[in-house]
Amino acid sequence: MQKFFLLAIILLICKISFATNSVNYNERLKEALPGFEMPSQWLQTHPAFRVIGNLYGVGGVDLASYLITSDDGHILINTGIEGSLKDIEKNIATLGFDIADVKILLSMQSHFDHTADLALIKELTGAKMYATKKDARVLEDGGLSDPHFGGLETFRPVTVDKIIEDGEIIKLGDIRLKVYYHPGHTEGSSSYGMKMAENGKTYNVLISNMGTINPGKKLLVDPTYPGVSEDFALTYRSQKQIGADIWVAAHKSQYGFYFKYKASQSYSPDTFFDPEGFLEAVEKLAAAYTRQLEQELAELDQKNKLRN
Ligand SMILES: [Zn+2]
């Protein structure tokens, strides 16, 4: 009798795991994005680290996830690709926190390399998913309606519980996190800012979604989505105006993580202090954007000339 009971339990577990894992999204990417090869760093884990105060990095070697802690629960921003959940969970545990205490999930951009395990973490923790309206649509359909990478689901769809507005302050315990709409990279990309006091200094901290333009994206001529060009311009303008004393981004490569941080060093609030580097990074992306606009216009000109 006991054996039967055990067998029934095993079958039930298999059935549950089969139901939740019936799609392998990392495999699916090959079909959804022909020619795409997963960068090897995207699969590699990285130990957790403290950015400043109660802001921690809990993601992988390049794909960044951030944990903001409070006595009343935590906020988790981004996952990595499918399978990143277990590394994020482990990283949170090594910091002395529990993933079960995550109350709010956020995303900076609704691309599969930052969202793939949001649905599983939501299921595991019961946390509420907050998103901008335009990214909510893409999060809920698993990337299907992404104007650039869409057409097929590229990650597990996640239900959004609350739409966040530009300038809104997300509150949890003593966390006060300001939402900034920084569209372009995705229609609903967003950054998150907060003030952090440490050693008698107050730092402007920005978890910044950088306005990178994915290859193949069109800004002016047959734009990837209507208004994409204006969106990028708004983002560069806004980021220059906000500025940041301390900044991090969705990819560690975007904010020079490995130039700033070595695993052996002890914590200092100034490790990621880099206000000039932030403006330079934004300027660099804005310049690439201007070059692409010029190129698209030149190509259009050429086409019109050939036509006449
Ligand atoms: Zn992206």
Image (cartoon, helix red, strand yellow):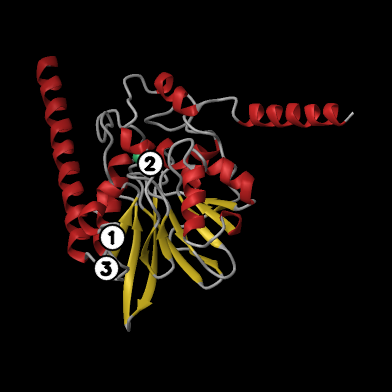
Alpha carbon separation for disc pair 3 and 2: 25 Å
- Mark 3 or 2 closer to N-term? 2
Residue beneath the point at 14% across and 20% down: 303
* Residue 247 location, quadrant: bottom left
22 over 65 or under it: above or below: above
> Are the two marked residues, 3 and 2, in contact with CB atoms closer than 8 angstroms?
no
296 over 197 or under it: above or below: above
- Mark 1 or 3 closer to N-term? 3
Circle 2: element type: loop
Q: Which label was assigned to residue 264?
A: 1
On the question of residue 9 being in view, the answer is yes
Residue beneath the point at 20% across and 55% down: 259
Cβ at disc 2 under 8 Å from ligand 1? yes
Q: 299 left or right of 226? A: left
Alpha carbon separation for disc pair 1 and 3: 23 Å
Residue beneath the point at 26% across and 68% down: 245
112 over 133 or under it: above or below: above
Alpha carbon separation for disc pair 1 and 2: 36 Å
Name the quadrant of the C terminus. top left
Q: Mark 3 points at which residue?
A: 245
Q: Name the residue under label 2.
A: 186
Q: 102 left or right of 113? A: right
Please identify, in this view, whether the residue under mark 1 or under mark 2 is nearer the observer.
1
94 over 194 or under it: above or below: above
Q: 73 left or right of 113? A: right
Give, as a three-letter code, the residue at label 1.
Answer: Ser
Please identify, in this view, whether the residue under mark 1 or under mark 3 is nearer the observer.
1
